Structures are given as structure tokens and as C-alpha cells.
Amino acid sequence: MESTVVVLNPAAGRGRGAKLLPRVREAFARTGAAAVHVTERRGDEARLVGEALQSGATTIVAVGGDGTWGRCASAVLNAGAGDAVRLAFLTGGTGDEIG
């Protein structure tokens, strides 16, 4: 069974992540396929990804910037789940701002 977990960093992009949170929750709620978890401090990504993998997540969606993406990817690889889970990235960092 497919299971998607979203890990969102609200501090990404000088608060841009927090502004994206309602839209991300809404978009994934419409699919009924995802749980959205929000980091509270740097490093939470490893814990949240680990918990997601333990609960059988097949897709991890990282929302933030390169720091969030890197920490989520590292958590997947460190768990040895690189072949068992998909990893998707949604932009929300400082470098992703337009205009």
C-alpha cells in the first residue's frame, strides 16, 4: 500500500515555508494520500523521516530549501531505505524565491 509523508520546514526561505503550509496541507488533503509533518528545529527532519519510514511510508516529500532537502535525503540514505522509498522535493527555500 502506498503511503506519503510530507516533511515541511516552516523556517525555510525566511518564513516562506510557513506561508506555504496551508496550501501544502490543502493540496495533499485533497489526495487523501499524505500526512504533513512540520519541523520545529533544525535536525527534526531525521526524526520525522525515520518515523515515516518505520510506519511504512513509500514516498517522502521534503518541502523547504537545500538544507531541508539534504537532511531528508540523508535520513533516507542513513536508514538504508534508498531503494525502498521515493523522495520528492518541493521548493520553499530562500534561493527559490521569485521576484
Image (cartoon, rainbow, N blue to C red):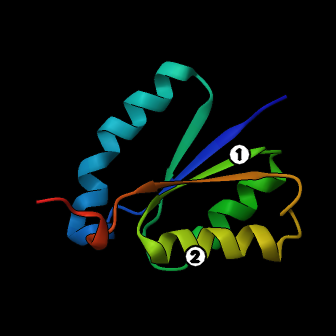
Which residue position holds label 1? 59
In the displayed structure image, the side of residue 56 where residue 31 appears, left or right: left
Secondary structure under tag 2 reads helix
Amino acid type, callout 2? Gly
Image check: 77 left or right of 21? right
Q: Is residue 68 left or right of residue 15?
A: right
Q: Is residue 17 above or below residue 47?
A: above
Q: Residues within 10 Å of mark 1 (few under 14, many from 20)?
A: many
The amino acid type, in three-letter code, at marker 1 is: Thr
Label for residue 42? none
Q: Residue at x 83, y 63 (%)?
A: 82
Residue with the most extreme left position: 99
Picture coordinates of residue 6, whole percent (x, y): 55, 48
Residue at the limit of the structure toward the front, as seen here: 99
Q: Residue at x 68, y 61 (%)?
A: 49
- Residue 71, percent across and down? 59, 76
Identify the residue at horizontal 79%, vertical 55% (top origin).
Answer: 53
Instruction: Give the residue pinned by disc 2.
Output: 70
Residue 36 vertical placement versus 52 (above, below): above
Q: Position of residue 51 (x, y in %)?
A: 73, 58
In the image, residue 81 lies at what x, y percent?
86, 62
